[in-house]
Image (cartoon, grey):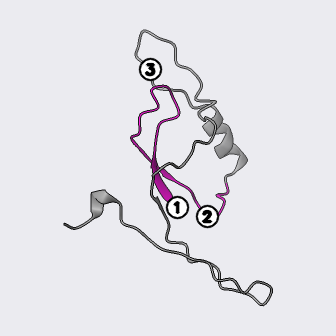
Amino acid sequence: MTYEGSMTQPGCLETVTWILLNKPLSVRKDQLMMLRKLHEAVDSGNPSLLMENNFRPPMPVNRRTVRTNIQPQKTTSTCNMQKLAFYEVNDRYRVR
């Protein structure tokens, strides 16, 4: 799934397309250790900081369009309610 959202740092500018994977990614321990050692890019006059705590609490979806290409699961004998699914094109991609 993808949706348009904002940065995690203050001014929280809405300039990001967030991507949510539907399956977990596997990483080796050495890869995880390398990620934990990443530093933020800063100008030469300031010391670099570890890239950590790069999150904030979930925010309301508001009027954002959430897009997916994941097919809804089929109904089963235990649940015969059909899932309502529809797709909408973001205004940016709409043909006029």
Callout 1 amino acid: Met
Q: Answer whether labels 1 and 2 touch (C-beta < 8 Å).
A: yes
Q: Secondary structure at mark 2?
A: loop
Overall secondary structure of the magenta section: loop
Q: Amino acid at mark 3?
A: Val
Of 34 and 80, nearer the camera is 80
Q: Which residues are magenta?
A: 1-26
Q: Residue at x 50, y 67 (%)?
A: 68
Q: Earlier in the sequence, mark 1 or mark 2?
A: 1
The crowding category of the residue bearing disc 1, from other C-alpha atoms within 10 Å (few below 14, some 14 to 19, many at least 20), is few
Q: Using the image as rendered, state which of residue 76 and residue 44 is in the foreground.
A: 76
Q: Residue at x 78, y 90 (%)?
A: 77
Packing grade of label 2 (10 A; few <14, some 14-19, many >=20) is few
Judging by the rendered image, the residue that carries numbered circle 3 is 42
Quarter of the image holding residue 80? bottom right
How many discs mark residues in the rendered view?
Answer: 3
**Against 44, is 25 above or below?**
below
Q: Which residue is mark 1?
A: 1
Q: Nearer the viewer, residue 7 or 80?
A: 80
The residue tagged with tag 3: helix, strand or loop?
loop
Q: CA distance from mark 3 to mark 2?
A: 33 Å
SS label for mark 1: loop
Identify the residue under disc 2: 22
Q: Give the percent coordinates (x, y) of residue 35.
A: 61, 38
Q: Rounded to the nearest whole Å, what is the CA distance between mark 3 and mark 1?
A: 31 Å
